[in-house]
Image (cartoon, grey):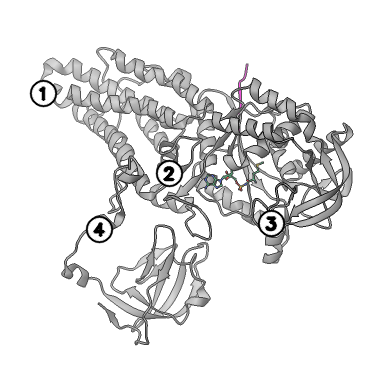
């Protein structure tokens, strides 16, 4: 029988700028999707954008365009990130899709006809920003408990989903299905919440005169649907109009969500499904939040980690690996570029990259790149390598990505030790040990084949390359159950030398992965001392900005025309901190003897100096009184 696997991410608010939190959930889902495809399951992997509500409407009207045009434009930011991160979602849902809206209306009508939705007069507190109603108990000093803004009293008729009656059934379902909410601590939080709160009914409508950008209620078009009610249904609606011929993906195998939105899923969504007599998803997994070097990420602090920037600097695979290696999925984690570099250098360049290049170099040296027939089977290695697949299956079912990586790394560590103990270079010295050399070299390359298969869901780009190099075939076609059998590596197969999979990142900031916060070495402490002669090589000059304009297609780069004694064009990555208008007229400092370079196709004849912090603050270096343009800075 065909086995189905259906994994989802939350649908992201289309107004948001994609950040590391979005990338985190989506890569988690991608790892699961890729692994399950390798296991031969029919996979449906869904992500998308949440596009209704007041904030979207306001942003669109501020931009002077229709909300639809606005969302058409913004959802591309997410799609672009998923392409860069090698995400293999099968569908991308938008809540403004006609197919989705039709299904939302169908389910609303069904609930209304069943008497699960009723109209009531409502009087209470409302937060316009969050589009939420609050009770007296929630509101503190007249402010919204979520966003802190002032709430207003509202008296109006609205439609309510009779959620309260599902309280007991919900508690029972959570208790009877221990894997329904994970991790355990989050499950207990939800149970605690249900124990101390009588579940209320859920207001699922907003009058159109107050909010027009939403799905109209089918039984009363004076109202639109509450955004969360509309959004949660995406998980089901997509299986009906975005999954091709296969319509049987519901119920989902797992919904991955952040800890902040677990209640809406565990309580609202579960109760909605119960009322619809539909099966509940098999698992809800709530992951933790990333902070940036110890601080909450926020736009105002300017310390939000930009995944595009990380990919640009370190590559998608390194980022994917780091976020799942560094922190247990489910707990909060702290993002630091120094730790990322440490991981790349130690785990990827050293442990894995060197293993690959050494092994292939030896194969080339001793056997001209042709895989020798093995004289004997190394049973310990064979058992270790073959055993990983079952362990991966178990760990990934529990979304224990770190444990899965530990299992794979046990093979890598074994192989590195295997080289050290067997010393192929010594075996190569005498013809008497040629048989043994063959076994060792075969086992090494065969071990690498296992590693490439197991790591492929985590680091698809480089592992596709490695597997292709070893096997001369496409990893995408592999069935893991059949491939994870020792001896499938072809004897006499020809393997060329290979470029470094993960070059070391050479930077002053490159530190070994810190074991604890205390061990983290600050970048300032490792800056090298230079000679005055070194400094004299750098020609710094004052430059007056004559004109400035954003470089097309970039949200960071600004093209400046400056007077630095002579007129030049300089491109500066300061677009997130300065508008072109405010730059004109400033006298800044530039590196005047830097080799010209092209940034996004635009030539830069110099570099503007700015001070910046790890938190993302940035300020230009300017002069503190009038001085002619082109003056030397020393
Ligand atoms: N639109 C709703 C979800 C509806 S699902 C039916 C929403 N969108 S969101 O864009 O605000 O958030 C999406 C996800 O990003 C959430 O799971 C949230 O936990 C996650 N993250 C936001 N900031 C984060 C970090 N700093 N770290 C990790 N994840 C974070 O909520």
| Closer to the eye: label 4 or 1 | 4
Q: Which mark is residue 527?
A: 4
- Helix, strand, or loop for circle 1? loop
| Closer to the eye: label 4 or 3 | 3
Q: Which mark is residue 141?
A: 3
| Closer to the eye: label 2 or 3 | 3
Residue 287, horizontal then vertical, whole percent: 54, 37
Q: Earlier in the sequence, mark 2 or mark 1?
A: 2
Label 2 vs label 1: CA separation? 42 Å
Image region (quadrant) for ligand 1: top right
Residue 258 counted in the magenta span: no
Q: Which mark is residue 429?
A: 1
In the rendered view, tell whether residue 298 sits above or below residue 397: below
Q: Residue at 33% of width from left, 39% of height from top?
A: 515
Residue 39, horizontal then vertical, whole percent: 51, 23
Name the quarter where the C terminus is drawn. Answer: bottom left
Q: Which mark is residue 319?
A: 2
Q: Earlier in the sequence, mark 4 or mark 3?
A: 3
- Rate crowding at label 3 as few (under 14), some (14 to 19) or many (20 or more) other CA atoms within 10 Å: few
Check whether the beta carbons of the residues at disc 1 and disc 3 lie within 8 A of each other.
Answer: no
Q: Earlier in the sequence, mark 4 or mark 1?
A: 1
| Closer to the eye: label 4 or 2 | 4
Residue 426, horizontal then vertical, whole percent: 13, 24
Which range is magenta?
A: 1-7
Name the quarter where the N terminus is drawn. Answer: top right
Residue 6 counted in the magenta span: yes
Q: Quadrant of residue 219?
A: top right
């Amino acid at each position: 029988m065909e086995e189905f696997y259906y994994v989802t991410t939350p649908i992201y608010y289309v107004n948001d700028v994609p950040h590391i939190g979005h990338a985190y959930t989506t890569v988690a889902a991608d790892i699961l999707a890729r692994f399950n495809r390798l296991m031969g399951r029919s996979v449906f992997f869904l992500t998308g954008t949440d596009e209704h509500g007041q904030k979207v409407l306001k942003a669109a009207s501020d931009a002077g365009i229709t909300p639809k045009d606005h969302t058409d434009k913004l959802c591309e930011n997410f799609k672009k990130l998923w392409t860069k991160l090698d995400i293999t979602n099968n569908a991308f849902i938008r809540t403004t899709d006609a197919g989705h809206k039709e299904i939302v209306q169908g389910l609303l009508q069904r609930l209304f006809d069943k008497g699960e939705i009723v109209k009531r007069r409502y009087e209470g507190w409302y937060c316009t920003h969050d589009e939420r109603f609050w009770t007296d108990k929630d509101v503190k000093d007249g402010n919204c408990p979520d966003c802190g803004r002032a709430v207003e009293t509202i008296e109006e008729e609205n439609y309510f989903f009779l959620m309260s009656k599902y309280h007991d059934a919900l508690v029972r379902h959570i208790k009877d299905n221990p894997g329904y909410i994970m991790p355990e601590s989050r499950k207990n939080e939800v149970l605690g919440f249900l124990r101390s709160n009588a579940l209320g009914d859920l207001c699922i409508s907003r009058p159109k005169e107050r909010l027009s950008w939403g799905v109209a209620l089918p039984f009363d078009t004076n109202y639109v649907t509450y955004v969360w009610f509309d959004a949660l249904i995406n998980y089901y609606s997509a299986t009906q109009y975005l999954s091709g011929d296969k319509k049987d993906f519901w119920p989902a195998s797992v919904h991955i969500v952040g800890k902040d939105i677990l209640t809406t899923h565990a309580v609202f969504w579960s109760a909605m499904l119960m009322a619809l007599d539909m099966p509940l998803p098999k698992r809800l997994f709530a992951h933790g939040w990333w902070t940036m070097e110890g601080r909450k990420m926020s736009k105002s602090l300017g310390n939000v980690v930009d995944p595009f920037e990380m990919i640009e600097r370190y590559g998608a695979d390194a980022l994917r690996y780091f976020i799942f290696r560094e922190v247990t999925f489910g707990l909060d984690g702290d993002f630091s570029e120094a730790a990322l570099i440490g991981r790349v250098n130690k785990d990827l360049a050293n442990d894995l990259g060197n293993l690959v290049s050494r092994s292939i170099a030896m194969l080339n040296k001793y056997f001209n790149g042709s895989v020798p027939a093995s004289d004997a089977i190394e049973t310990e290695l064979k058992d270790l390598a073959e055993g990983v697949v079952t362990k991966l299956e178990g760990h990934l079912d529990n979304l224990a990505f770190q444990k899965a990586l530990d299992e794979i790394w046990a093979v890598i560590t074994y192989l590195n030790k295997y080289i050290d103990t067997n010393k192929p270079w010594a075996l190569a010295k005498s013809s008497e040990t040629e048989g043994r050399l063959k076994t060792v070299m075969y086992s090494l390359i065969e071990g690498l084949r296992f590693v490439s298969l197991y790591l492929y869901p985590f680091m698809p780009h480089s592992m596709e390359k490695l597997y292709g190099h070893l096997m001369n075939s496409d990893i995408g076609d592999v069935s893991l159950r059949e491939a994870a059998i020792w001896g499938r590596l072809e004897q006499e197969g020809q393997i060329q030398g290979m470029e470094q999979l993960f070059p070391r990142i050479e930077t002053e900031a490159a530190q070994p992965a810190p074991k604890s916060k205390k061990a983290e070495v600050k970048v300032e402490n490792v800056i090298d001392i230079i000679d005055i002669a070194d400094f004299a090589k750098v020609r710094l000059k004052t430059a007056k900005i004559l004109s400035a304009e954003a470089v097309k297609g970039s949200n960071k780069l600004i093209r400046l025309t400056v007077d630095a004694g002579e007129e030049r064009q300089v491109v500066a990555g300061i677009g997130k901190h300065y508008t072109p208008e405010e730059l004109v007229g400033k006298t800044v400092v530039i590196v005047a003897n830097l080799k010209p370079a092209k940034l996004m196709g635009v030539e830069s004849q110099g570099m503007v100096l700015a001070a910046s912090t790890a938190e993302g603050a940035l300020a230009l270096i300017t002069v503190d009184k009038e001085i002619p343009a082109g003056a030397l800075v020393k």
